Amino acid sequence: MTFPKNFLWGGATAANQIEGAYDVDGKGLSVTDIMTAGGLDHPRLLTYKMDGKLQKSPSAPGQGLPEGAVGAIDHNEYYPNHVAIDFYHHYKEDIKMFADMGFKTFRLSIAWTRIFPNGDDEQPNQVGLDFYRHVFEECKKYDIEPLVTISHYEDPLHLSEKYNDWQDRGMIDCYVKYAKTLFKEYKGLVKYWLTFNEINSAVLFLNMFGGNGTDEDYQHAYQKLHYQFVASARAVKLAHEIDPNYVIGNMICGIVDYPMTPDPKDVLLNRHDWEQDLFYCGDAQCKGKYPTFAKRLWDEHNVHLDITEQDEKDMLEGKVDMYTFSYYMSNVVTTHEVKDKVGGNFAAGAKNPYLKYSEWGWATDPTGLQYYLEVMYDRYELPIMIVENGLGAVDKISDDGKIHDDYRIDYLRLHIEAMQKAIDDGVDLIGYTTWGCIDCVSAGTGQMSKRYGFIYVDRDDEGNGSLDRMPKDSFYWYKKVIESNGNDL
Ligand code: BGP
């Protein structure tokens, strides 16, 4: 029972959650730059609803929403990602700390708006390109392989408005041009790329929150996904042309569903949830075509998609090379009445009596990770990477001035043990990057106090703090894990 020799141990982040410096050196506004401290849990400016219909957002922060809009927010609120942990100015120090832990890989995303400030500019922004070049060079200094997410919930605001959040195929060309720029620019510096973070979230979240999505919501989500599949496929093809050594992955939000009862109706519902939430996107990007059940999913919500023959050809020719996913928790589904419900950020459904829940209602379920790995490897037979996993918790500085985050160590240890079991089962697991390896702004709550890191960053929910970095106990533990290639847990 041991991990493969070149196993990629590391950690994961996203530009909008760590970089800060949101308006410097020519960077344009991205959709996350106009989200408040409420984070994704709160209605977004871009998708507010009026009279039951999705509406276009106002064009700039500070511009009010019309009366009657659901999701109107106070524009004077604090935007935590504007500074975040200021990785933009601390990247050398941070990468050095990752190297001290022995990282083999570091997952980060590129802020599209640093490269193309509006998303559809003629020429890329040289200062933005240089920034990431310096980051990658710093990684190389320590033999850390960058793992780059091309798009992590940070579309350029201008594009998102122009194309109403991927409702127009004009978005595809902009994405492909952006991706091509990166593939050419960072040839030799980067090997691993992910096209879209948690691509399935568009439809998964509609389904998770009590199935409240309207037909229009589903129409929007499936059309957005289709254009993203085509954009991803065209990027994969280009990447392989530019450098045959490039390895490109999809990225799925891997929430495992279980049926609450043995009632066959629950078991079938569970199967259908796996199809809609996970296999639909997995198949489109790994098999290059829509699954047979896609028609049922579209018909269920009266969805009609703009799909061309060329799109289908592109999807087939642009299959990804590896399957990657985030994993935090499992979920329970049922057709029956639910007595004991889970509540929290991004948590919904029935409570599982066999599992413990985090402060945010996320179920700790390492067996679910093993289950997921075995199902997905069997389905796609592609190398797999877990590119996010971890425990969000409020960390307290003890009297000795240190952070004793044994709860985090326990969580990660159990998940690494589950990974070992999947590997023993034959799963070709090639890497593991824990989420938020350094504390960052939470996507769901928009706050700093939900922390995941091995490295503590002194900054609070109101934006106070020195931004100083400090290793937690988990820092030394993970270092040992990597040193022993997963044997010393
Ligand atoms: C995933 C996102 C990440 C990250 C993580 C933790 O869905 O890809 O960006 O934030 O979840 O979620 P949260 O920050 O809400 O705790």
Image: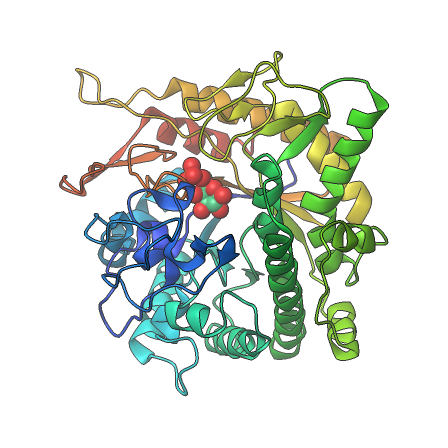
Ligand 1 falls in quadrant:
top left
| Residue at x-position 59% and y-position 37% | 208
| Residue at x-position 61% and y-position 49% | 214
The correct choice, above or below, for 178 with respect to 12 in the image is below
Query: Residue 100 vs residue 47: left or right?
Result: left
Q: Position of residue 187 (x, y in %)?
A: 51, 73
| Residue at x-position 70% and y-position 49% | 383
Residue 251 at least partly seen: no
The colour style of the image is rainbow
Q: Position of residue 182 (x, y in %)?
A: 48, 73
| Residue at x-position 29% and y-position 70% | 27
Query: Residue 295 vs residue 195: left or right?
Result: right
Between 367 and 298, the one lying in front of the other is 298
Position of the N terminus by quadrant: top right
Outermost residue to the top: 353
Q: Position of residue 365 (x, y in %)?
A: 59, 23
Q: Position of residue 195 (x, y in %)?
A: 57, 62
Query: Residue 232 vs residue 363: left or right?
Result: right
Residue 309 at least partly seen: yes
Between 70 and 123, the one lying in front of the other is 70
The correct choice, above or below, for 321 with respect to 453 in the image is below
The image quadrant that residue 306 belongs to is bottom right
The correct choice, above or below, for 407 with respect to 10 in the image is above
Between 271 and 187, the one lying in front of the other is 271
